[in-house]
Structures are given as C-alpha cells and as structure tokens.
Image (cartoon, coloured by chain):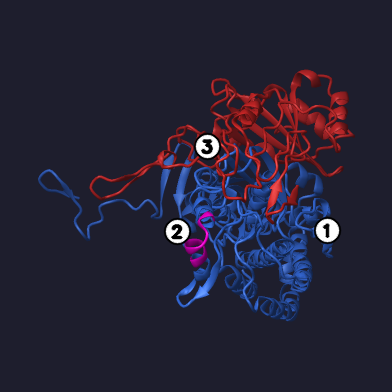
Amino acid sequence: MTTTTGSERIVPGEDVLPDPYAAGERRTTEGTVYTVTGGDWDSVLAGGDDEQHMVVNMGPQHPSTHGVLRLVLELEGETVTSARSVIGYLHTGIEKNLEYRNWVQGTTFVTRMDYLSPLFNETAYCLGVEKLLGIEVPERAQVIRVLMMELNRIRSHLVGLATMGLELGALTAMLNGLRESEMILDVFEMITGLRMNHAYVRPGGVAQDLPPGTVEKIRELLVSFDQNLPGYDDLLTGNPIWRQRLQGVAALDVRGCIALGVTGPMLRAAGLAWDLRKTDPYLGYETYEFDVPTETTGDGWARFRVRMREVRESLKIIEQCVDRLAPGPVMVADTKIAWPAQLALGADGMGQSLDHVRQIMGTSMEALIHHFKLVTEGFRVPPGQVYVPIESPRGELGAHIVSDGGTRPYRVHMRDPSFVNLQALPATCEGGLLSDSIVAVATLDPVMGGVDR
Amino acid sequence: MTTPDAHGSTAITPASDGAPTARSGSAVTPADTAARSGSAVTPADTVARSGSDMFGATFGGDTSGFGGLVRRPPAAASSPRPYGSWFDEVADALEEAYPGFSEAVTRVVVDRGELTLHLLPERVAEVCAVLRDAPDLRFELLSSLSGVDYPSQPDRLHVVYHLTSMTYRRRLRLETAVTVEQPFVSSVTAVYPTADFHERETWDFFGVQFTGHPALTRIFMPDDWQGHPQRKDYPLGGVPVEYKGAQIPPPDERRAYA
C-alpha cells in the first residue's frame, strides 16, 4: 500500500489486502485452524497435532448442505462424534415485515418462506386469515387450492430427490427430477404467471380462475408422469448403489421423531401414519380418496420410498380435483373482502379488465371507493388469534396469526417443518460416517428459506 | 359461519360466545362500541383499535349498501363453563391430574373453536409434563412455540405454545406472559426436546429467557447482535436516498390507515 498526501489509495495490481479465504493455517488457543481450498489436504494431515480429532466447518457455502446450512462436525477419523447445525444465513425478517403490510400483501411475503412449497405457505396463511374472519371460500377455490398444493407437493418431492441425487453423486437422478419438476412449473406459470413466489392464494379464495386449456394441460401432465415415474424405479429404487447409500443410514424411530417434533415424510417413514390431510382435514381433503404411505425402518431409504409413493398419491388427488372442477366463483362474494381486481388478457398482456375499469370509473362510485379502500388500506380482521396447521411436503406447516382488529397482521408466526425437523440432525448424524451425514441432511430435506424465514 | 344475505354478500355473525349479532345494514352506534370496550378483555384485545365496520368508520359511515360485515367483539376474559366440544374433558382431566391447577391456570379462553389456557410463567414446564403424560390428555407433540409482544400490557412479552395430542387428535394453546424486566419462563426442553430451537428463536427475537434451557443462544441473528428485533419498539431502519437529502422513513413512521 502506498500513501499519498492525506488519503490512502490502492494501487492496481498490488496485493493490498490479505485474502481471508486463501489457503493457510493459523494457531489459536483451541488448536491450529486450517483453511483448505481443495487439493491441499496433505498440509492438514501433515501438520495435525492430534491426528484423529478434527472439527470440520461444513458450509454455509457447500454443494452438499442443501442450501446455506452450516454444519459443525467433530470427527474422530471418519466418524462423526458431534454434529451441530448453524442457521440464520438466510434470515430475511419475513415475519417482522408482515406486520407492516396489509393482510392481502401478506401472501406475497409468506410465499417466499419455504420457496419449494410456496402454495402451502400461502394456503396456511390464508386459511388462518379466513378463520379469523369467519369465512369459508367457495367450492371451486377449495378444489383449485388442493390441486395446486398437490402439484406443488410433487414438485417439492422431485426437487428434494434431485438435490439428494446431486449430493450423493447420482447426477442422472438430478436431471430426471428437474425435468419432471419443470413440467409442473410450466403449469404453475400458466395458472399464476410465475414459477415461484406466486401469491396466487389470497384471503377469500384465489387470485384468478384457471385460464382456458389448464385442464387439458394437467391431463397431459398426468399421462407423462405415468410414463416417466417407472423410470425412477428403474434408475434408483432397484439400483444397488443407491440402496447401499441409503439403507440403515440416518435412522430415527417414532419416539425420537415425536420428541424432536419431526413430522411429515420422516415420521411416516418411521412407521406412524400421521398426515394432517387425514387426521385434521381441511379444504375438503376428507372427500378425496388417497392413501398415506408408510415404511417401518425410519432410515434414509424409507424416507426416499415414502416420498416416491407420496408422489403417486398426489397424482391420484390431482386427477380427482380435475374431475371435480365445476364452474363457479373462485373468491368469496363479500365485496368487503374479495380483491376487487378483474383481470383480463389485453393487447399488452394481463392487466386490469377495461370493462371493469369502465364500470367502476363511469357508473358506480361505491365500487370505485371500495376498490380504492381495499387496495390502499385493506380490510380489517376481527381481533383474536388462531393456529392453522396443514400438511406441507416436509410436515406440519402451522400459521399462528394474531390480529388486533386492524388492517395489518399484529403478529404472524409460521411453524415451519424444515426448522423443526433440522433438530433431528445430531440424532441422525452422530456415530455415523461423514459421508452418511450427507444422506441425513438430504433425506431430511430442509429448505433454508423456510428454516430461516 | 357465513350466511348469505339479501345483497348476495355474506354476513359474519359472532360465534358461540353469546355476543349480540348485528346484521346487514344496521349501523353500530358509539354506545355499542363503548359497551363492548367496557367488557373485560384479553391482553390481545386491549390493543384492538376502535371502529365498528370493516373499513373503520365509527359512526355508521358505511353508506355503500354492502355493509354485511360486523366487527367481532372481543372474547370475554375467561370463558364460562361449559366450554363446549372436548374442552371441558381436557380442563377436567388437567384439574384432576395437576393439583396446582387453580393457581397455575389464570384464565381459560375459548375462541374460534380453539382452547387457550393462560398459565403462570414459572409453572409452564410442570403443566406441560402433566399434559404430556396424563392418560386422558396425552399431548405428545409440541407443534409450535413462539412469542408475541403487546407493549400496552405490563406483562408485555407473551409466549404461546401449541400442543398436539396425536392420541386424541386435539390441539391446545398455552399462553404465558412476562415483563421485560423479569423475562423468565420455565423451559419445556426437558419435556419436549423439540422446544430447543423454538426457545432459542423466542429468546433471539423477543428476549424471553427460558430458565433450564441447555444453551440459550441466538439462533437467527448474529451472536453479537444488540436488541430483540421482533419487539414492537425495536427501531426500524429507513432508506437514505441520494436525492437532495431525501430519506424514505422506516415502515412504522410511514402513512398508515389504522
């Protein structure tokens, strides 16, 4: 670094600041800390004071940690003696932000929590708001919500499977999983306009009706899934390497699951058929015919099997939804709650329907006032608190919503299953090999957006 | 809870708590509002804003003709027996299994089909142990634990527990309240190990200290962070804009309608 009169200047080409991420070693009171960048393990192994005992910081930027998850692993040789997860790298203060937006705007925030199951976040939140309001959404909106959630469940399981393949070195599984999930994203894009962060489910119903051609597109999707799903069995279920990586690894029994609050596919893989769609039905799930797949071993293999079988059950539900879609409103009739927008496809894309604009501007002052009040200020929700749980792809997703009677939520807390399930990590990793801790994380399938919120 | 009215819209009628049912078109008078706010209220309700219709008009200002919705009156302080549904069974079973019931449980509130027991903060862990183990209760799963801040209350920091009985398929809410000066709640980690992360989160965001927690450290915010961000009086940041010294104010100082 060179200094000129009074001000510091960095001279280009000169290495002025030490790179904190460069390979190297430094002595601390707790031992030598090595920064390794790949290909330089020899220096660690050669310099170790204690050859066997090592603490490895894995993540938050590591391709096998399923997102910005940091694991602190204590190793004796290759055996994990202690595993702790460090989270918060993706904390964005969504729950705090919600308190400064109105009730409808809340859906655009919660959809970003667990970004692989946006429609579940929206539905849990909206069911909570609707319970506070004391309203029930129309039949068609309920069917559409179920349809969208089940498509989302398949998508989430396939991405979980794809990333699991990536982390375990089965790249074909990744490409296959992403190929199928793209097809579902196409359907989402057709219906909501977006591949994720939809804000499609709104308090009182859904943002808009299904566009023409949706049902045909979903039927095509069902056919192609029927054709492609056996490929997964050929590729993975019968694959001896895949079996050996997963069987008997990262097991957790029912007692452990319940003590640690673990729900969803992990609990069902351990043998308890606990599925909120059956035990605590919402949105008419009791009227659909489907099974709750379970396994008994509770290991990585059982979780993989449960997720694969749940995909098939979801396909059954989607088929029933498509058959059941009868014409009708998709938003409550109450104009004090229903979002006033009437969308239509114009020459320049989707936008406010010109007929609707003409009507509220030219003929009905009250409708105009309502439109203005609802959009700028929002509706009020009677004071009180509710807790609404639904079955997300990862387990119990609960919305605890408190209202003080105003136009904005007083407090929203989402009980995210990824956050709770992550506590099972020490129980599933400790005592196993380092490579098996990857299986534990992958089959736990945490989504860090949901964990950190 | 919805009934179609003559306008084709829906009217919400208050639930089973015996409150007056106002219907479409009836303007709520200030006297009604005063009568409601004069009744005993829950901590959550004391922060409720006044106003009588969904758009906040206080003197029947809704001339739209829609007017089906009526604001729900606050739930009573403690719901009278019988609570209805299975709530009485649970209350009786807990009273029988837990001798300190009358001191530990300060209020029992039934609202929107959900049962809430308000507890003393130092008794939470004891009550949870009974709720988990008693054969007639069997709340095996702690679904959720989080905080709510009510700055207008002396006991402003509330901790809310959501318990699930997988055996009986029931859900129960526990609620306790502490002051900022004495923010001590007994930890339930020994009863429900799953409370570990939840209690760390509630400490991080609200500053509630759970006595008996094995390692109560921050979980989302950095270790050296100052303050507890989910408290209502936590300062929010504005956005400086490089245009003639302009500044976008923090969200709580912006224009608000309610």
Mark 2 lies on residue: A37
As rendered, which of B128 and A334 lies closer to the eye? A334
Which mark is drawn over residue B230?
Answer: 3
Residue plotted at (61% across, 64% down): A167
Count every numbered label the image shows and give the total.
Answer: 3
Q: Which residue is mark 1?
A: A286
Chain for colour red:
B
In this picture, is A271 found above or below A28?
below
Q: Amino acid at mark 2?
A: Thr
- Identify the colour of chain A in the image: blue
The amino acid type, in three-letter code, at marker 3 is Gln
Image-quadrant location for residue B110: top right
Apparent side of residue A278 relative to residue A404 in the rendered image (left or right): right
Query: What's the distance in space between the residues labelled 2 and 3, CA to CA?
Result: 38 Å
Q: Nearer the viewer, mark 2 or mark 1?
A: 1
Image quarter of residue A140: bottom right
Please, what is the three-letter code of the amino acid marked with disc 1? Glu
